[in-house]
Image (cartoon, rainbow, N blue to C red):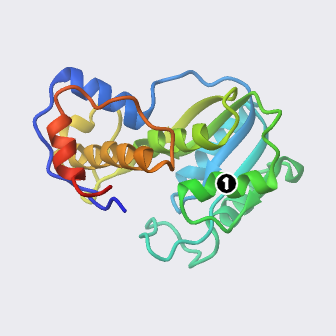
């Protein structure tokens, strides 16, 4: 398993930064009316807040929420629900803000991104879905996009709608300024390496090739992983 969340980062060129940004954060797309809103489970309240934005704009027909209770990862500081499944909390939040019950499908067994998608397929039929918006934290969007691409029908148009996250010191970062903070540089590089690792492992759709100039860097960190 790949565990280097904060690897030492090399100096990056503007071209490398742009390519890594598109891979890790997903290429920018405008929101449009979609068949399904897919919500990756999270303890961050921004998850249901961003979901409500999509719903209230009338941009989705159905909502699929996927996420159990993780005892290993740290929880958001505003999470006050103990080990209650993330999907159930999000489900209850959406109901409390007026989302129609019949539009929501959820599962609460999954513990990682791959299971999020695989278990969601057990409670929702994606065979007739043509378009999908998914909610995730910003720097996880690329990996979670590729998870959906791996396990859902290839004809589905998938659009990312992510929320910004914070570093330990409270600094927020996004696709436009992650390269300005040493820790977010390391975090984003770690996510880029994670995308390569899980792609080669077969858990997500694999990216084609390594960012030019980072071949030795990637090989050195992932050496012996496979």
User: Of residues 190 and 58, which is closer to you in this image?
Assistant: 190
**Which residue, given by chain and number where applicable, does mark 1 sit on?**
118
Q: Whole-percent x and y of residue 117? A: 64, 51
* Count of numbered badges drawn on the protein: 1
- Residue at position x 46%, y 69% in the image: 75
Q: Whole-percent x and y of residue 60? A: 75, 34
Left or right of residue 39, residue 142 in this image: left
User: Of residues 166 and 5, which is closer to you in this image?
Assistant: 5
Quarter of the figure with the C terminus = bottom left
Left or right of residue 73, residue 125 in this image: right
Local secondary structure at mark 1 = helix
- Residue at position x 43%, y 42% in the image: 138
Task: Kindly indicate the quadrant of the structure image that contains residue 118.
Answer: bottom right
Quarter of the figure with the N terminus = bottom left
Left or right of residue 162, residue 127 in this image: right
Q: Specify few, some or many for label 1: CA neighbours under 10 Å numbering under 14, 14-19, or 20 or more.
A: some
Image: 85 above or below 103: below
Image: 98 above or below 74: above
- Residue at position x 78%, y 40% in the image: 126
User: Of residues 171 and 68, which is closer to you in this image?
Assistant: 68
Task: Kindly indicate the quadrant of the structure image that contains residue 173.
Answer: top left
Residue at the limit of the structure toward the right, as seen here: 102
Task: Kindly indicate the quadrant of the structure image that contains residue 109.
Answer: bottom right
Q: Whole-percent x and y of residue 222? A: 25, 51
User: Of residues 60 and 4, which is closer to you in this image?
Assistant: 4
- Residue at position x 62%, y 68% in the image: 68
Q: Whole-percent x and y of residue 17? A: 24, 28
């Amino acid at each position: 398993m790949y565990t280097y969340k904060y690897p030492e980062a090399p100096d990056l060129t503007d071209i490398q930064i742009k390519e890594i940004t598109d891979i890790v954060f997903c290429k920018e797309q405008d929101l449009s009316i979609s068949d399904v809103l897919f919500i990756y489970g999270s303890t961050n309240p921004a998850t249901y807040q961003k979901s409500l934005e999509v719903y209230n704009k009338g941009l989705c027909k159905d909502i699929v929420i996927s996420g159990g209770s993780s005892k290993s990862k740290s929880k958001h500081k505003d999470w006050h629900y103990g080990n209650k499944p993330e999907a159930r909390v999000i489900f209850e939040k959406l109901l409390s803000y007026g989302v129609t019950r019949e539009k929501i499908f959820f599962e609460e067994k999954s513990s990682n991104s791959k299971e999020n998608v695989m278990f969601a397929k057990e409670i929702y039929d994606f065979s007739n879905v043509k378009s999908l918006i998914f909610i995730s934290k910003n720097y996880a969007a690329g990996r979670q996009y590729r998870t959906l691409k791996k396990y859902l029908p290839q004809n589905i148009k998938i659009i990312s709608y992510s929320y910004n996250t914070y570093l330990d010191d409270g600094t927020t970062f996004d696709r436009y300024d992650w390269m300005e903070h040493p820790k977010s540089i390391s975090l984003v590089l770690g996510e880029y390496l994670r995308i390569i690792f899980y792609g080669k492992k077969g858990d997500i759709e694999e990216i084609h090739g390594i960012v030019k100039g980072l071949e030795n860097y990637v090989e050195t960190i992932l050496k012996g992983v496979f």
